[in-house]
Image: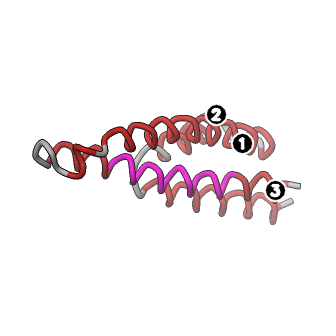
């Protein structure tokens, strides 16, 4: 029952986490390089990736809400998942933490 929803969350969390790393790389690359560098010339590409990241993050929020309501998690826990997904690299840990919690909740039933 939760397997498809959990799998969708895991896939989306991983995609959003990788996408966040790309967005941050583009932002930092633009800040630390000089005018005319590869990072500066390709800012349009990073703008598209950034907008895609925003859309994918909204999909992730919906999946967290659906999974959290199904698992009867507190709003604070669901909010913590969403906030941790905003931090590069920590987002991967948050996905694992959530997956383990779903497994533990399923085992206790």
User: Does 4 appear above or below 86?
Assistant: below
| Mark 2 element type | helix
Question: What residue is rendered at 31% in x and 48% in y?
Answer: 26
Occupied quadrant, residue 70? top right
Q: Tell which tag, 3 or 1, sits nearer the viewer.
A: 3
- Is tag 2's residue or tag 1's residue first in the polypeptide sequence? 1
Does residue 1 appear to the left or right of 23 in the view shown?
A: right
- Is tag 3's residue or tag 2's residue first in the polypeptide sequence? 3
Question: What residue is rendered at 60% in x and 35% in y?
Answer: 58
Is 82 magenta? The answer is no
Report the residue marked by disc 3: 4
Where's residue 28, x and y in %? Answer: 24, 47
C-alpha distance separating marks 3 and 1: 14 Å
Is 22 magenta? The answer is yes
- Is tag 3's residue or tag 1's residue first in the polypeptide sequence? 3
User: Does 10 appear above or below 82?
Assistant: below
Do the CB atoms of the residues marked 2 and 1 lie less than 8 Å apart? Answer: yes
Camera-nearest residue between 52 and 57: 52
């Amino acid at each position: 029952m939760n397997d498809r929803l959990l799998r969708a969350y895991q896939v989306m969390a991983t995609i959003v986490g990788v996408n966040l790393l790309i967005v941050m790389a583009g932002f930092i690359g633009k800040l630390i390089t000089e005018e005319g560098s590869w990072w500066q010339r390709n800012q349009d590409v990073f703008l598209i990736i950034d907008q895609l990241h925003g859309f994918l993050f909204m999909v992730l929020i919906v999946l967290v809400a659906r999974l959290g309501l199904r698992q009867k998690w507190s709003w604070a826990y669901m909010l913590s998942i969403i906030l941790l997904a905003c931090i590069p690299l920590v987002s991967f840990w948050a996905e694992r933490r959530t997956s383990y919690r779903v497994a533990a909740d399923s085992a206790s039933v």
